[in-house]
Amino acid sequence: MHSGSQHLFDIIILLSAAVFIVIAFWKMNISPVLGYFVAGAVIGSHGFNLIHSAEVMDNLAEFGVVFLLFIIGLELTFERLIAMRIHVFGFGSLQVIVTMVAIWCISLAFGVSTNIATVIGGGLALSSTAIVLQVLQEKGSQASQVGRLSIAVLLMQDFAVVPLIVLVPLLAGNSEHSLISSLAGSLVQAAIALVLIFITGRLLLRPLFSVIAKMESNEVFISTTLLIVLGAAFITEQFHLSLALGAFVAGLLVAETEYRHSVEHAVLPFKDLFLGLFFMTVGMSINTELLLNKLPLITLLSIILIVLKTSIIYILCRFFGFKSAPAIQAGLLLSQGGEFAFILFRLADELNVLPSEIAQVLMMVTTVTMAFTPLLSVLEIG
């Protein structure tokens, strides 16, 4: 089959699986996110192998998280973000550090080396931005106490990805620089990227949207919005940051203008489409043969991860003055592995820091815990 026709056929398969399986899950009053996971698992290479351009789909799926973070940025303002600074930099930093150290110690107890334990701890300390925010959105709980805390923690985790990605090549011995100089360099790059987006946005956004609004062209308005989102994501990606971080900052800048609601309306269809695709690609990564062969180990590690992260977040919540119920809810909501874990584990595998078998098991644990998040979030979030 011609490559263009193959891509078209794959898209038809994806949309068909999404429509029928997600509707079935909705009828059973089960989170659509879980439906996307199942749909991906059914049509993926470990299911009926109906998709033959998985790499293209993976690249498209990244935009789901990009648009999601842009929407979150639109719903915040710089003032609200500053007001959340204690939770972002205080709570969020402690969550990453404490979780990473705890998993590092547990990994050593399983008999792995220090370098492997460091990669495992860093990867599993992160949660899934896409799934957590989607669950919050389904419940309409972004502005709740648990919702605000979750967003703060996820933002800090996005910042933490930068030093973790720098760390992996250092552990592999592939860097000529020391840890301190490499981290300092990455932080400088991050600052430059964010300042560049901030200055450009402050100078251009309001005049640009003013001209576009006078044209009264819906197509040009949507194109301009997409240009802003993808342009900001491109800038941060060039500085080795996450695509989603640039989109989030762009959202914050647009939120300061009078056009925020129009922009949000223009972006929502793209966010929903690509985010569903993201969840399906995660489902496609579920290796049923590996899952069955190592079911006891994967189950044990998944339970350990969920219990450990829930416990750590619960204790930190209580320390920061949260009541018991929202502390438990926040812990369960953030207890899974995240999409950035796939990036870290694949990079560590390619650089021979992490044995391939361990990397596969860890990615399976990450996928399983992500899939169970909608079920763990059944408690009312208040």
Image (cartoon, rainbow, N blue to C red):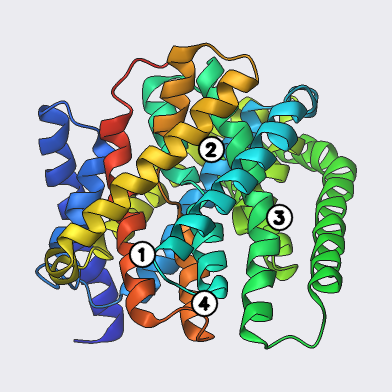
Question: Is residue 168 among what the camera can see?
Answer: yes
Q: Earlier in the sequence, mark 3 or mark 2?
A: 3
Task: State left or right for residue 243 relative to residue 56.
Answer: right
Task: State left or right for residue 235 relative to residue 47.
Answer: right
Query: Residue 314 at x, y = what percent?
Result: 50, 26
Q: Which residue position is annotated with label 2? A: 266
- Residue at left offset 15%, top offset 65%: 288
Whole-number angstrom distance, CA of label 4 to CA of label 2: 38 Å
Residues at badges 3 and 2 in contact (C-beta under 8 Å)? no
Marks 4, 2: nearer the viewer: 4
Quadrant hosting residue 306 = top left
- Residue at left offset 58%, top offset 42%: 69
Which circle marks residue 348 in the picture?
Answer: 4
User: Above or below — where is 115 with respect to 375?
Assistant: below
Marks 1, 3: nearer the viewer: 1
Q: Earlier in the sequence, mark 1 or mark 3?
A: 3
Q: Given the image, on which type of amino acid does mark 4 rest?
A: Ala
Q: Given the image, on which type of amino acid does mark 2 rest?
A: Ala
Task: State left or right for residue 277 relative to residue 191.
Answer: left
Q: Given the image, on which type of amino acid does mark 1 rest?
A: Met
- Residue at left offset 51%, top offset 66%: 117
Query: Residue 167 at x, y = what percent?
Result: 67, 71
Residues at badges 2 and 1 in contact (C-beta under 8 Å)? no
